[in-house]
Amino acid sequence: MLLVLVVVVAAVILIAAPLRLGRGPAGEASASAQRADLEAAKEAKYREIRDAELDYRTGKLAREDWQQLDGALRADALQLLERIDELESAEATRDTG
Amino acid sequence: MLIVALAIAVYGTLASLYGAHIRNNVGLGGRTGRAWIASGRRAVYALFGVLAVCFVILVSAFLRSDFSFALVASHSSTTTPAFYQATAIWSSQEGSLLFWVFLLSGWSSAVLFLSRGRAREIAPYATAVLLGIAAFFCGLLVFLETPFGRLSPTPIEGAGLNPLLRHPAMMFHPPMLYSGYTLFTIPFAFAVGALITRRLSADWLRTVRPFALAAWMCLGIGIVLGARWSYSELGWGGYWGWDAVENASLMPWLIGTAFLHSAMVQEKRGMLRMWNVSLVLATGILALLGTFLVRSGVLNSIHAFGASTLGVPFLVLISVLVVGSVALVISRAPYMQSEHRLDSLLSREAIFLLNNLALVGLCFVILWGTFFPLISEAFTGEQSSVGPPWFSKYTMPLALLLVLLSGLGPALAWRRTTAANLRRELMAPVAIGAATLVVLLAAGVERRAAALAMFCLGAFVIAVVVQEFARGVRARRAMSSEGVPRAAVSLVRRNRRRYGGYIVHVGVTVLLVGVAASSTFQKADDVRLAPGERAKVGGYDIQYVRPTSRIDLASNGSLEKIDLGADLRVRRDGKAFKLHTERAYFPSNSAGLGAVSRYFEGEATSEVGLRAGLGHDLWTVVAPDTGLLDDTIERGDRVFAAATKLPAAQRAALLGETLRRLVARYPADAPPARFRVLVSPLVTWIWAGALIVLGGGLIAIWPAPFGATRRMRAPEAARLARELGKA
């Protein structure tokens, strides 16, 4: 019985803490779903660039096909990086302002 | 304690949904919403803690042989070895359900903790789904199948663990299987969250991918351990019988395999969004269906150790999940348009698509065959089932197609491959596949088309992967001037997913070659031999040298089992070795049996005599004829039934002496025994293939060094800009 009581008290303290403080974890305030999407897209693009290069070097892609593909992928990646930078600048401005 | 767990699960579900609701309505206050969401997430951690306490209490009751717990009394005994006492918890219905929800809460805690900075819009809904499913299982434990039922008065002895489950594989098989099922629930929950929030880009895939891969590996290991247990414990010599419960574990694994491939297509090309979500939802539901089939007893199975009344609640849950999933997918269809179209049929994504269709087709065949008894009953009023030949007829062509695709996939580039490049990629592997056929036919291998096709395709796949590694190492060396071993390690380390996946392809191929060989070319015979006699099976000369008998005592001195066996001498090609096989008789606690006969009329298991090799296995079990002991057993029952006034200690001593004499009499005067002998080629390849799959899976799942992706960003940006002429 004592064990049940201890477990219940511990569970209540753990679960109720965010409600008592009236907010979620501090980091959550700056959550940016858009940025998460961009980061995911960036990682996927980097992987695609590396995979394309490996495909070319292992003979699966012709040189001209690879060059065309690589150029397009890098342009996409740069666009993503620029959008992430813009988003970071906007977040920084909002935080300091 | 379980009521506390149920309350936490229900609270967490509602808190997460409420938090998400008010967070989405800014007017009502985003901060409060985040607080409720955080509280819901913490409910998952709390649930894990509470269920861990429940689990520890129950395991400790098993280890202490505390028979005041009804569960311990019905599934363990003082004669059950401690090793198996610790694992007896999941041999029971109630213990299994507790273990399931305990694992679910553990994995849910892990995913929510590790992804706390990501997929924030989706996470509250995923939390609600995970806790909702946990609440369902807690509800079953509270209202229908409590593991903490007590007995009064406390029995002196328990019924013992089902002898069939006293096998080392059983220590790990259920935990791995249940880990697979519960881990597949995580991608399911996140897919539901992604659909509700309409956030269907690759972000949620990135969050759940490691868990989907871990689920796939755990379920795969569980399936293979189950096959190993069947091969060495069930006494029929097979490792796969297309049993309902076996099929139930294979189906989510197949759809999970399809998802792991198609997820890459979405990550790279933004294609197959609806397909991926559907696969994940199907995998999660099939995982629950697997648990339902094991636990409900709705279909006959050698693995269904717990027939019960859980069928209706499970059916309701699965129906709700199926209807809800279909409704969500249909309502969100406009948000799941592909970003690109298939550029060419000669591309890796085209092969992945074909592989997905084959895997889903395979799953459908197995689903149809598994539920055929219920389907036939619905239409004809009589249950009829389909057997292994039916399954083999439809699954073999699909398995061959999958092996072919697992060789073609690595040979093709993403987006498009030119015909010239494809020719160069495939020339050597095709030649090796054809050479394999010529060599096999020249060696006199029986002309069985499906098996020969599997061997040739197996050689083709292995050749493709070896070529891929060789070319990759060569490319790596050209860039870095590293030595071959270092270049190979660097290549794999930098491309874990790709090369880990290739190793998995080799493992699956080796496994399927083993399955094709052992199922096609197995030699089986049932022989009846008297001591000293011999028989020839599959090129082996087997002599029944002598019968054996033994009483095994538990650590407390009580009789655990009686073994009646046979020593065999085997000769082949001038080499000789010994084998031993025996039949173990476990005492029954049935009150209707006599004092002596209860030691022979309980459960019995076969200990296999096995000589395993890379080329083939020699497998044998003995079925001793206990007829000569029947008269003595019957007389003993009558004597002990009449001796009611004998003091307990004297009675026990006399009974012990009677059993010793009985057991000693068997080898002295043993009648002929029946032996089942199997010679199965390449069975070891199945276990070796599974180990290769495990190795490849571990490489693929191993995370990149912390911070590596962040560090890469600045130089990558500079490099990108420079090369594009913008710096």
Image: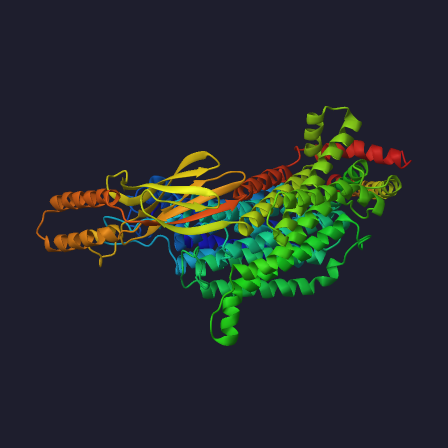
| Colour style of the rendered protein structure | rainbow
Quadrant for the C terminus of chain B in the image? top right
Q: Whole-percent x and y of residue B474?
A: 76, 30
Is B177 situated left or right of B354 in this image?
left
What count of labels does the image hold? 0
Q: Residue furthest right?
A: B725
Q: Camera-side residue: B355 or B677?
A: B677
For the question of whether residue B265 can be seen, the reply is yes
Q: Residue at x 59, y 47 (%)?
A: B512
Q: Camera-side residue: B2 or B380?
A: B380
Q: Residue at x 15, y 43 (%)?
A: B653
Q: Whole-percent x and y of residue B139?
A: 44, 58
For the question of whether residue A22 can be seen, the reply is no
Is B267 situated left or right of B382 in this image?
right
Q: Whole-percent x and y of residue B411?
A: 75, 43
Q: Residue furthest left?
A: B645
Q: Camera-side residue: B697 or B712?
A: B697
Q: Residue at x 68, y 32 (%)?
A: B493
Q: Whole-percent x and y of residue B343?
A: 82, 52
Is B351 situated left or right of B116 in this image?
right
Q: Residue furthest bottom?
A: B380
